[in-house]
Amino acid sequence: MAGFPAERQEDQALAMKESWEVVAKDIPRYSFLFFTTVLEIAPAAKQMFPFLRDSEVTPQNNPKLKAHAVKVFKMTCESAVRVWEKGEVVVKDMTLKYLGSLHRKNGVTDPHFQVLREALLRTLKEAIGDEKWSQELEAAWGEAYDQLAAAIRVEMK
Ligand code: HEM
């Protein structure tokens, strides 16, 4: 994987897996934090989501938002861990082609992908805690997210 010497890659994969195991203990909580962080960084993105548009329901009480957040957060984390372990981008339950066309239809652009990246890293840092979070971990998650986002963007063209 770019950015790290080959002999460090196993360590990186292990560190990522360990951090994902911490987060996986409370997926509903961190998925919700992830999604609300996206909206905090980019409030206008609310208009993109059918279950938020014109919705008066507070995010905490919106079951569609919660279900969606879990799906996206889990997929992103599982795929990122796999990128580090195997060096390949794989998504579960749906194809990259489907994700590409879905996001194109919804008007998702490059800056949106950056927002998601920032929200992902902030959420993981919060979950892992300042003491255990490191620049290396941040770089490893960031790199893996970039590969997943790039694979989706290829299918959006
Ligand atoms: C839907 C994943 C980036 C906006 C989805 C779904 C998944 C997903 C799994 C649900 C598909 C389904 O259930 O049929 C991802 C991943 C991303 C990513 C892995 C990045 C690596 C983004 C970004 C935005 C975005 C950057 C814009 C802020 C949406 C919208 C939907 C959606 C609007 C449709 C929601 C609906 O109609 O219910 N995404 N997404 N996604 N995503 Fe993403």
Image (spheres, grey):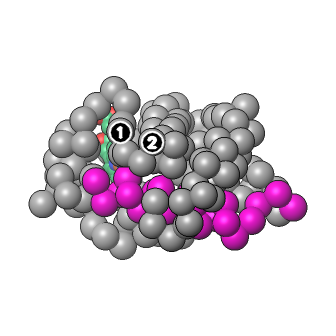
Q: Secondary structure at mark 1?
A: loop
Q: Position of residue 122 (x, y in %)?
A: 65, 62
Pointer 2 with pointer 1, Cβ within 8 A: yes
Question: Which residue is rendered at x = 17% and y = 47% of the image?
Answer: 101
Q: Quadrant of the C terminus?
A: bottom left
Residue under pointer 1: 90
Mark 2 to mark 1: distance in Å? 10 Å
Q: Which amino acid is tagged 2?
A: Lys
Compared with residue 155, is residue 51 higher up or lower down, i.e. above or below?
Answer: above
For residue 24, say whether it is visible.
Answer: yes
Q: Extreme top residue here? A: 93
- Of helix, strand and loop, which mostly describes the magenta segment? helix
Q: Which mark is residue 86?
A: 2
Question: Which residue is rendered at x = 56% and y = 66% of the image?
Answer: 5
> Which segment is the magenta one?
131-151
Residue 133 horizontal side relative to residue 98, left or right: right
Residue 71 horizontal side relative to residue 60, left or right: left
Q: Which mark is residue 29?
A: none
Compared with residue 31, is residue 9 higher up or lower down, i.e. above or below?
Answer: below
Question: Which residue is rendered at x = 37% and y = 53% of the image?
Answer: 148
Compared with residue 122, is residue 111 higher up or lower down, i.e. above or below?
Answer: below
